[in-house]
Image: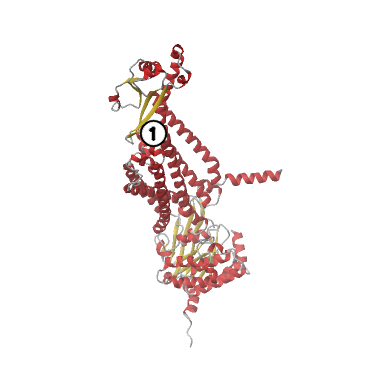
Amino acid sequence: MNVLIELMKKEIKETFRNPRYIIFTILFPLILFPAIGYIYNFSFQAAQEQVARLSVYVVNLDNGSLGDEFISFLKKINITVVEIDLSDLNSSGYQLALIIPENFTSSFSEGISSNIIIKSRIGSLSFTMVNIFQRGEALVNAFERYLRRNIISQVGLDAEFLNNMFETEVYVYVDEWGREVPGRSIASIALQLFLVPWLIFGLVVSILQVSAAMLSEEKEYKTLETLLTLPISRKILALEKILGSVVVAFAATAAYTVGFLIYVFFLGTGALAVDSGLTDLIGVDILSGVRPDIIVLLSLLFFLTILITGGIGLLLSLFTQDTKTAEGLTATVSMPILVLILFGVLIDISILPEYIRIIYYSIPFVYLIKSFEYLLVNRIDMYLVGIIVNIFWLLIILTLVAKMFESERLLTMKLSFSLKIGRRGGEG
Amino acid sequence: MRLPTYSALYQVRPLILRVVEGGSHRCREMYAVEVMELVKKYGSHLAVDKASFKIIEGEIFGLIGPNGAGKSTTLRIIATLLKPTSGSVKVFNYDVVKDAKKIRSIISYLPEEAGAYKYLTGYEYLEMMAKIYSRDDYMEYVDRGIELSGLGSRIYSRIGEYSKGMLRRLLLARALMTLPKLAILDEPTSGMDVVYATEIRRMIKRINSEGVTILLSSHNMLEVEYLCEEIAIISSGRIIAQGSPDKLKDEYGGENLEDVFTSLVKSR
């Protein structure tokens, strides 16, 4: 039994003194899950609050009285209703509008389903955008239930009609996009918006690991000291490592750009394109492919972001003495990027306070994460903004990397918690 | 009358210089290394404590001491890898802080735990290193490196396939193939069997005879006694004794260098 306890003690010490385990088993769940939870909560709460405050614009084209009955019902359940003419709707600044058809009362009397058009207007595409038109659908459903409870019993209509009194037809106008899409396509678009950032996340993590390994491998295989005593300036050495990242960045950019364009091609020819009119976008044309200027900007954005990622990887490797620690550290750094992805996808950034938006848009990864969305909404100008932000960060990171190579800390620096456990940098 | 060869003259030069060393400032330019009041701290840990010693150009100098005495730190400072906390270190009159780049062009350094790129062949490794030193004469370096390594046709195998001894020979060949003015060798025969270690000692002697000053550290006292003309013993970061092996044996009354070393370190 004593032997077992001693062996267990050894196991626990070995495990919990290894930075990799600390990161994966303790820091990862402690930071990541609360962060994801907070973002989900924040985004949906923000969307719900926004929706609850919304005024509902109603265009009542009904020739009978049921339309008025619907409006009274909405007011009765404390909805702020703005009655408006159809011709004024587009200029009204509505976010949620219901258009009651001319035959609303007559169809109801004859036991035929009639079509209520739900229009919603959103600033930018995000996962929470579906909340608005779902609110419209919920109001129509509530009116149906109200009718079933209070009116139908007196009229005596057939059961099939009772279950389907009104059809809804949803349209979403996206300000950023400058066009209206059928509601049935929104879910598909949202799915794509979620998928592409995840692919980019995979790219960022792999580049981080490769670049961090470039230097930590030199440490682990004991080649760094020799390298640093060769008659080569430290700036050249730093440049060599950065160019190593550039080669990786080139290969990754080429692979991702090609993959991305093929992805857009399939998207453009698929059912989603037919539904949402993607093919009409300026950025995507199935016949001629993506515009060359967009390819250039997108490639440059990819390249710069990946280069920054490589630079960060090199900086991280300063704190590591071997590739395993480098992997653990890159995993930790990947977490904020992951949170950023969730943030960008779940939340309609345009509704956030200005200072948060400024912080958000000064982060270099944002533009690559949202590159597909920008392509979709034809915000190619955002590629340019992204390129400028990325160049700014790249210069800072390159300066830091060059300084790092000038310093002896390149050899002696370690993660502080491993320093306390292990030996100092300069033994002997 | 047959004149002595340049190589033979070069070998006796350090001895002559040591004789005339006492008091003559004219010999100053002959020092390959001058370490003066060197202090190196890592945080609060004092790794080297006011160490001073000089190495004359052309000699084989041994820095010996127990584990953690400050040998590797001192060698790393001379090799421009680390900066002194205080004191000064000069290599051929160049300051290790101000003239680091210049020093790197005239020295080569073999760390105790050195490795090489496992996916390169031994030949590619030597070629890459030689080209860093000279784009014109690199083949001369490579040829010398191949010969020094003694790896034969295995020089074309990937380094990842080498045994520990083969790797060490390759690394030592890399360090010596350019005939640097100063070769700093940290435990050159570390972890090697007797046969390999003997070969390496011969290699060091041979390269020294071609004019390369050698600074080495070692745990092996027999090796130090065989190779070095001058020795400094370091303990807890301080130089506690310095002299030729014979002088140290006389001074501290030991039968061999091992006795001298043990009694000196224990007395600290």
Residue A355, percent from left and from top: 35, 35
Decide: is A204 above or below B126. above
Q: Quadrant of the C terminus of chain A?
A: bottom right
Q: Residue lying furthest front in this view? A: A110
Nearer the observer, B4 or A118: A118
**Crowding at label 1, few (<14), some or many (≥20) Cα neighbours within 10 Å?**
many
Residue A166, percent from left and from top: 41, 22
- Amino acid at dot 1: Asp
Mark 1 element type = loop
When asked about the image quadrant of residue B92, the answer is bottom left
Q: Quadrant of the N terminus of chain A?
A: top right
The residue under label 1 is A348
Residue B249 visible in the displayed image = no
Decide: is A26 above or below B157. above
Q: How many marks?
A: 1
Residue A86, percent from left and from top: 30, 24
When asked about the image quadrant of residue A168, the answer is top left
Describe residue B141's horizontal placement relative to residue A375 as left or right.
right
Q: Chain of mark 1?
A: A
Nearer the observer, A218 or B215: A218
Decide: is A277 above or below B43. above
Describe residue A294's horizontal placement relative to residue B250 as left or right.
left
Describe residue A28's horizontal placement relative to residue A346 as left or right.
right
Nearer the observer, A140 or B110: A140
Nearer the observer, B257 or B195: B195
Q: Residue lying furthest bottom in this view? A: B1
Residue A196 visible in the displayed image = yes
